[in-house]
Image: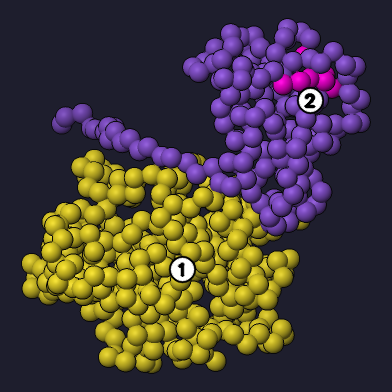
Amino acid sequence: MSEPIRRIRTPMRLEYQIQAGADLTNFLQKLTEKRIVGRRSPTGKVYVPPRGSCPVTGLPMLEEVELSDVGTVTTFSIIHMEFEGQRLPPPYAVGTVLLDGADLPLFHIIGGAVEDVRMGMRVRAVWVPDEELEPTLESILYFESTGEPDAPYESYKEHI
Amino acid sequence: MRDVAIIGFDQLPNVRRTHLSDVEMVQRVIEGALKDSKVERKRIDFWCSGSADMLVGRPFSFVSALDAIGAWPPVSESHVEMDGAWALYEAWVRLLHGDFHTSLVYCFGEASTGDLRNVLVTQLDPYYVAPLAPDSISVAALQAQALVDQGKYTERDFAEVAYRNRKAAATNEKAYLRDSDEVDTLLQEAPIVGLLRKHACPPITDGACAVVLATREYVEANNIEAVAWIRGFDHRIDEHDLGARDLADSPSTRIAAEKAGAKLGAIDVAELHAPVAHQELILRDVLGFDASTKINPSGGCLAANSMMVAGLTRIGEAANAIREGRAKRALAHATSGPALQQNLICILEAE
């Protein structure tokens, strides 16, 4: 008896061009103007990036809301591992940034010394040079401290 | 068995490439179907959807589409990785349990994001067939060849099916191909694969549709008039291995039709999910309609073939024929898998 065949290889490659949709396309295009736009849902919450449909009510989110590029770190994690596609050498912090006026935090890199990163830290987006702006969140290099006093826990506890 | 009816339907226009995301498409057809049924969103007891991640190349794509249903407070929800016609089947079974009275079923498909002919290779048998990578048109061409080899039909028959469907779509503003050259002109096209010419193949389109179901208790309590009652519903599957099947026949359609009671009365309108022209001929042979049956008045899948949507659209179109008084009894068919592998039959009737 020969050895049983336990595995076969059937390589397959498929390429896709994803359709971002109307709301996300608008969000991504505005990033090339260093603007961050969200949408207000019928429940009053501001979603950024906008989601196409309010997840609570299922209704369209009709009102566009322009947000500042300043916000508060609600939580964070420090990356010590190396992996493919990394933009910074470890250690560095990634966190969720609740932009002022938004109800949904964005995930992004928190720049500066990792020992200084903390919940409630006030941060501002650091954009790539104007000629490198593209319709992607990578047009923001990272968020860095504004130097303001920390936001009180009460102001962001709903968004953790 | 409890009576369940289709009381609402909506579909987006089928387009070559939509500018909308999945959730934006779904959001629109859910609103449309709710409006058509006059059921308020919060009165939907059960939600069910059909879609396929391989079309958009993104895992769990149905989860992001849930944003469109308004799932707070939490709702009862399910999904099938299939055409929405099978999601409707699940919803129908769920309503038969007796504790739920309404259901909204939706489906969406954006085939324009990928290379559809090759995406469909992923549904083939993974050991013996998929490694050979026959694309969907090549698989369909094997089936067309089987029909011609058995002396059942000719390429002219295929062209006549394509011509009739696309001419019928002239009155369907949601269809994509809504006109056709004459049959003699069609036959001058060069074949794409084997015997299949472009006209015998379906267009690649993006789309979405939604159907609302309700039990008799709900229909009577709310005085709903435009209804199409589900009188029979069954789906069956043939051998996955293409070589083990007679591709010129469809035993699973025959059994599903029998179990659904297709022959218990005359069929006024039949909507057949036959993406490639010759598949309509196979289905007609199996289903054996009278001369009075109108087949695909919507233009069928040769006019618009949004993946995961075209099957439920057949049921929605057949239901509308009844709800609008154009038919007393209608048959809707949906298919899934390569070369008519799996087939579903839904029999709809007026009161």
- Image height of A61 relative to B263, above or below: above
Q: Residue at x 90, y 16 (%)?
A: A149
Q: Is residue B103 left or right of residue B320?
A: right
Crowding near the residue tagged with mark 1, few <14, some 14–19, many ≥20 C-alpha atoms within 10 Å: some
Residue in the foreground of this view, choosing between B181 and B224:
B181
Q: What chain is the purple one?
A: A
Query: In the rendered image, which quarter is residue B242 located in?
Result: bottom left
Residue linked to disc 2: A70
Residue linked to disc 1: B174
Q: Residue at x 65, y 29 (%)?
A: A33
Q: Chain of mark 2?
A: A
Instruction: Measuring from the top left, give residue B111's x and y in whole percent.
Output: 41, 51
Q: Is residue A137 left or right of residue B60?
A: right
Q: Are marks 1 and 2 in contact (CB under 8 Å)?
A: no
Q: Is residue A132 left or right of residue B188?
A: right
Q: What chain is the yellow one?
A: B
Q: Residue at x 61, y 20 (%)?
A: A130
Instruction: Give amino acid for label 1.
Output: Lys
Crowding near the residue tagged with mark 2, few <14, some 14–19, many ≥20 C-alpha atoms within 10 Å: some
Q: Is residue B87 visible?
A: no
Badges 1 and 2, same chain:
no
Q: Secondary structure beneath disc 2? A: strand
- Image height of A91 relative to B138, above or below: above
Instruction: Give amino acid for label 2.
Output: Val
Q: Quadrant of the N terminus of chain B?
A: bottom right
- Image height of A121 relative to B349, above or below: above
Q: Chain of mark 1?
A: B
Instruction: Measuring from the top left, give residue B247's x and y in whole percent.
Output: 19, 64
Mark seen at residue B31: none
Q: Which residues are magenta?
A: A117-125
Q: Quadrant of the C terminus of chain B?
A: bottom right
